Image: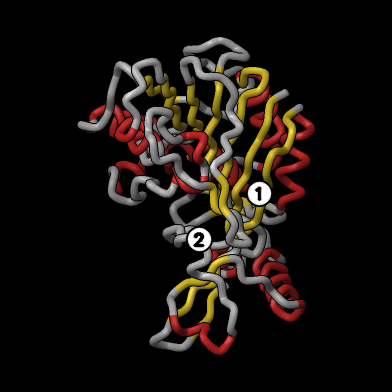
Amino acid sequence: RRHFCHDYEFTRHRKKPRVGERFLRDPERVFDFNTWDNVEWDEAQERTALESVQKNSTVKMTDEAAERLEREADANWDKFYGVHQNRFFKDRHWLFTEFPELAPRNSRDAPERVYPEGTAGREVCVPGEGPRTIFEIGSGVGNTVFPILKYSVEEDLKIYASDFSRQAIQILKESKEFDGKRCEAFVLDATADRWEVPFEESSVDIVVLIFVLSAIDPDRMQHVANQIYKYLKPGGLLLLRDYGRYDLAQLRFKSGRCLKENFYSRGDGTFVYFFTQEDLRKLFETAGLVEEQNIVDRRLQVNRGRMLKMY
């Protein structure tokens, strides 16, 4: 059996607080801090969010414009990384808190997995003590890969880093943090019918998919899930994190940017889909994986200067 753990969020740019530090116990203290963990919505907030999405998705992008964006997808990602290089995304040092399965085995300080209710555990759901193989789909310029390489001295660790953008892979390979002995980077279109990858089927311990599936047309997501299952070892693990339904970014889209239900085009020509837990459960269980964890990480952001609350 292959497994998947999923940590899905409503807002993206954040640091993980220490356990129990940012839970809003007293609504009167909401403006004491800039962010709060796992704040539940009431019915009025759910209704307002739904109305916002219905409003911004009523007028769809024209078929002609959508087809042009699809044709230019690789060029748009290359342009994105050509402009931003390695400056846009910061290295994901929260990885070892959210996904301790990626932490180095030789570290005495095993990281905690922090749950929304504030509890924490140190269990790791990757079996075996042999060599580890990690395959990241959508590695970008290495913001996930480099923290793993930095903190691990495992000589038998092998990381495969892939991305749709040739520009991103080139930047990754030119970085001084790149370790060609333990990491192999290559271009991959995850939506392609056949994957050209440098490893065999059923050979990967962990597949990492962070803010990547959302950039793929929903009509091709099941194919991607099926391919992931094909390359995971029996007992292997998929670690996934992505955008949740009614994310603030979704609510802020203007009319005419929606291509299909909950799927939008950003101003730079890249795509984004906003998931529910059931969306992901259906995708990966249909592919053959077994759900280990599937949680929503809700974050309340506060503008204390303007006294605004952003869910």
What residue appears at the point 68 percent right and 31 percent down from the top-left corner? 3
Type of amino acid under label 2: Val
Q: Is residue 59 visible?
A: yes
| Residue in the foreground of this view, choosing between 19 and 277 | 19
State the residue at coordinates (64%, 54%): 274
Q: Secondary structure at mark 1?
A: helix
Query: Is residue 259 something one can see in this rendering?
Result: no
> Outermost residue, front direction?
108
Left or right of 148 on screen, residue 214:
right
The quarter holding residue 110 reads: top left
Vertical comparison of 209 with 52: above or below? above
* Residue drawn at the location 72% of the way across and 70% of the way down: 50
Is the residue 12 above or below the residue 101 in the image? Answer: below
**Residue 226 figure quarter:** top right
Residue under numbered circle 1 = 63
Q: Dot 2: within a 10 Å radius of its alpha carbon, few (fewer than 14), some, or many (20 or more) residues?
A: some
Secondary structure beneath dot 2 equals loop
Cα gap from disc 1 to disc 2, whole angstroms:
47 Å
Residue beneath the point at 59% across and 85% down: 27
**Residue 169 located left or right of residue 302:** left
Q: Position of residue 115 (x, y in %)?
A: 60, 54
**Of the residues tagged 1 and 2, which is closer to the observer?**
2
x%, y% of residue 19?
50, 60
Q: Please, is residue 94 above or below residue 307 in the view?
A: above
Residue corresponding to mark 2: 19
**Circle 1: residue type:** Asp
